[in-house]
Image (cartoon, rainbow, N blue to C red):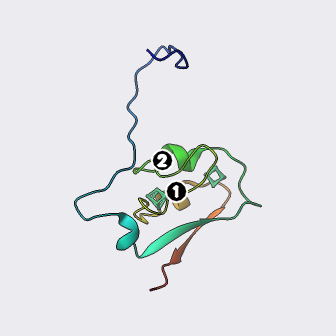
Amino acid sequence: MDKNEKKVGYMTSMSKPGKGCAGDTGEWRVFKPVKDEEKCNHCLLCWIFCPEATITKDIEIDYQYCKGCGICAVECPTGAITMVKEEKQ
Ligand code: SF4
Ligand code: SF4
C-alpha cells in the first residue's frame, strides 16, 4: 500500500480513462458536457457517475476521453452541466 493511501472498510473499483478501440472519444463525440461554474456546488455526483472517469475531483472534464454520453448532465442536481453539440473543426 502506498504511504499516501488510507485503509478503508470496503472495496471498490476505479477505472482510469484510456484510448478505446474507436480511438480517443474526442474524435467522434457528437455532444460534449459544458459546466456552469456558477451553478456547480461541487457535490461530486458527476465525478461518481461518469462511466469513463473523465471528470476530476475538481470537476474538470477531460475532453480527450469524454464520450458525450450525458450521464453527468442527467445526474447533476443543480443543472450545472449542459450537453452542447460539437462544432466541426
Ligand atoms: S458526458 Fe459521459 S463521459 Fe463525458 S464527462 Fe459526462 S458522464 Fe463522463
Ligand atoms: S453533479 Fe453538478 S453540481 Fe455536482 S459537482 Fe458535478 S457539475 Fe457540480
The residue lying at 39 percent from left, 43 percent from top is: 16
- Please tell me whether residue 58 is drawn above or below residue 33 in the rendered image: above
The residue lying at 40 percent from left, 51 percent from top is: 52
Does residue 2 appear left or right of residue 21 in this picture? right
- Quarter of the image for residue 43 reads top right
- Quarter of the image for residue 88 reads bottom left
Amino acid residing under circle 1: Cys
Name the residue beneath numbered marker 1: 72
Name the residue beneath numbered marker 2: 49
The image position of residue 57, as x and y in percent, is: 60, 43
Q: How many labels does the image show?
A: 2
Nearer-the-camera pick, 14 or 89:
89
Amino acid residing under circle 2: Phe
- Is the CB of the residue bearing disc 1 within 8 angstroms of ligand 1? yes
Outermost front residue: 3
- Please tell me whether residue 12 is drawn above or below residue 24 in the rendered image: above
